[in-house]
Structures are given as C-alpha cells and as structure tokens.
Amino acid sequence: MRGMHTFNNLIYFVAGSGLYSITSGGTLSGLLGTLATSSGRVQMADNGLSPTGGNQLMIVDGTNGYIWNVNTTTFTTISSWLSQVVAPQTVAYLGGYFIVSGTSGSFQVSALYDGTTWSGLDVAAKSINSDNLLACYNTGGLLWLFGSDAMEIWQQTVGHPPFALVPGFVSDYGLAARFSVAKGGGTLFWLANIKGDKGELIGAVMATSGSAPAVISTPAINWQWSQYLTVSDAFAYTYTLEGHSYYVLTFPTANSTWVYDITTQLWNEWSTYTNAPYVIGRHYGNAYAFLNGKHVIGDYQTGNLYTLSSTVYTDNGNPIVSMRTSQHLFNKGELSNIVVGKIQIDAETGVGDNVTINPQASLAWSKDGGHTYSSDYQASMGPIGQFLTRLQWRRLGIARDRVWRLTCSDPVKKVFMNAIVNGR
C-alpha cells in the first residue's frame, strides 16, 4: 500500500503499480490504471466537487503524474514535465488548480479544474530562500511551500502562476521529511529541520494552527530521532477517533512509529507484534483514509486493508502488547533504600469476557535505571463483571531506584490511569 485518498464516496489506493478503488462496504474495483513505478510513496489530490470539478483524481509517484477521470473512466499518464519540476513528488489542490512539486526546487500549476493540461507559464520557485522545494500543501486556503531550510506561504492571485508570496509569512523551519506533512485537529504538522546555535540540524515535529509554528516533540524524543540513520523517508497521517485526534509519524528505515495525541499533547509509540513481546518496531500502517465512519489502514507488507477501531483488541489476529514504563522512583533527599510494600494500578477492572476469562497484567521492575528488568509478575484484571477487582502487587523488595514496567497483551479493554506505590 503506497497511498490512499477518499474521493466521490470511494477510497482510491495504489498497491504495487496498480490504482484501485474500494467502497466502505468492501467492494473492490478492478485495476483502474498502471503506474510506471511499483514501490515508493505516492500522493493524491482531487479537483473538488462538480459541476466545476469532481471528475479528476491526480496521483504523483516521483516519476510521473497520472489522472484518473471518474466520468470517462480513463487513466492518463503525464510524463512531459518542465525541467524546473522534473519527477513530481507531491501534489496539492487549491482554488481549482492542481499544484505539483518535483525534485528541482520549483512548482507547477495546472489549468483550471484540469490536471491533464499544464502551461510553461505557470511555474515558480520559492522566492525568499534558495533551498530546494520538497513539498507543497494546501491548508487554510493557502499554499504552503516547504523547503529543506525554510517554509513560505503563498496565496491565490491573478496571473501566471496564479499564486504569489504572502509578505511576512516565511519561517526558518525547513522540512526534514517530504511526506511527514499532515493536517488534523485544525493543525498542520511536519517533521522539521531546525538549525541550532552552531548550525547543526535538529529534527523536531512542528505544529501550527496559523502562521506561528511551535515545537511539540520533546527534547528526549528529538534526541531519539537524531540517533536514526535517516529520517528523510518518514511519512505521516492524522485521524480522529472518540474525540481524540492523532498525528502518526513512521520512520521506515529506523523501523519505528511515533504517535502524538493532539488532544492530550502526549506521545507514545505504535508497534506491530513480531513474536517478541518487548521488541518495538514500526506499525504496519503505511497509508490511511476515512470513509463513511471507517478508518482504513493499508499494510506496507502485504497490501491488506484494515479498519482501525478502539473496540477490537487484536491486530489482524495478533496480540497488541500494551506497555507503560514509569519514571524513576527514588528518595530524592538521601538516595537511600526504599522498602516497597505495595503497588496498585488505578485501572478499569472486570474486563474479562467469555474467551479471556481472567485477563492478566504483568509488572516488572528495574533496579539499575531501566537497563535490565526482573521477571514479569502477573495480577488479575478481573473476570467479566468483577469491577471491584484491585490490580495490585505486594512485597516488592528494597532498592534505591526503581523503574516500573506494566504490560498487558490479553485481548481485552485496557484502561490504565494511575499508579500508587506504598513504600518507606
């Protein structure tokens, strides 16, 4: 699964070199068109609603552009791009125009409502900085142009091209990963290049609901990303479920997926189970689309399509290993030994069902700062309906420093809210 897009009450997706569509009920189309490439990410945009538009879906794959016309059911390849664009990488749609950015630092604008027609007059480059243009994006009725070193905002106007720089709307936050730009919860997010005091580049996630970006990733997370061999292949999508909006950022080469809860402003990691409970890798979601109440995820390994739900407690039949690691527990005044009599987890209990009769949570602890952990010790989360079950462990020994690790892989509802430790 290389990319997905919702248009005209269908989800269009590219799997391998083929373009397909699927309904919210799961009815799959035949092959609609064939791309020149079979791997790498694709981006899509559509030309809005009829009667002025509503008939064209555009796909770019880093080699060509393609138009699927839903009215004539024709698939057209656009391969003759100007040298200033070359190999379109990203596509946006704004004010009746498709806009593509390529590998040569410029962007090109289509004819009005028609992605099959492109004029050499409608080409422009970022005007303030000389860095390469990596991505174009439409948000808030404005065209955002992301370069490697800086970002500019353009607005629609009259002329060739029909967009012009908005004076003063320039930021020194560049783009570290072309496909990390995503919009959700009224906010735009991207993995940014930030220049430090000595000219070094710091990778951090930026967010903005207007024109003043702010860093939302923590220094600890930024440091973690700095250890990756590459971050330029990162990609992202957003979704909203049960009142929470999420920004999902995956680093394929680094084999990791980080998720920002926009509502609570907290970060966590997603991982797909690989027969090793404590091995954390990337999530297999490679593309996302929403249609008729369904959150649809495309698998990067198999091409499977999944629906994302908070009431399904397995991952395509595999366990979901939920793990929470605590901060350090120590005697701040004297760094002396602490005798731990009991730890109790404030959790929803009585969550067993007819299949998982007596679900368990496991507790382990580290005495060496989180480098190594004890064996796992289980406690009951309560059979079905036993809501007064207390999730607790007793007689936990002595240590100057403790880090706790709570784990649950049983396929039941998991709500862990707080931990209370009794010690002296």
Image (tube, grey):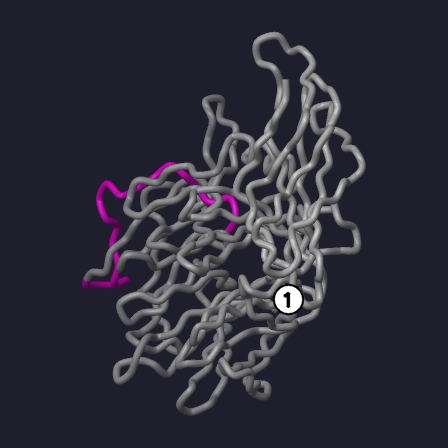
Residue nearest the viewer, comparing 237 with 46: 237
Question: What secondary structure is marked by label 1?
Answer: strand
- CA neighbours of label 1 inside 10 A, class few (<14), some (14 to 19), many (20+): some
Whether residue 314 is visible, yes or no, is: yes
In the image, residue 376 lies at what x, y percent?
Answer: 77, 40
Residue 6 visible within the image = no
Q: Which residues are magenta?
A: 158-178
73 to 295, vertically: above or below: below
Q: Position of residue 71 (x, y in %)?
A: 40, 90
Q: Within the image, what quadrant is residue 108 found in?
A: bottom left
In the rendered structure, the answer to whether residue 212 lies left or right of residue 400 reads left
Q: Is residue 376 left or right of residue 415?
A: right
**Above-or-below relation of 410 to 406:** below
In the image, farthest residue toward the bottom: 72
Query: Toward the viewer: 343 or 131?
Result: 343
Q: From the image, tell me which residue sits under label 1.
A: 299
Quadrant into which the C terminus falls: top right
Left or right: 411, with 135 as reference point: right
The location of residue 339, given as percent across then percent down, is: 69, 19
Q: Residue at x 71, y 45 (%)?
A: 379
The answer to if 163 sits in the magenta stretch is: yes
Is 8 displayed left or right of 410 in the figure? left
Q: Residue at x 57, y 9 (%)?
A: 333
Amino acid identity at mark 1: Asp
x, y percent for residue 182: 44, 55
Total marks placed: 1
In the depicted view, which residue is nearer to us: 144 or 250? 250
Which residue is rendered at x = 38% and y = 57% of the image? 137
Q: Which image quadrant for residue 106?
A: bottom left
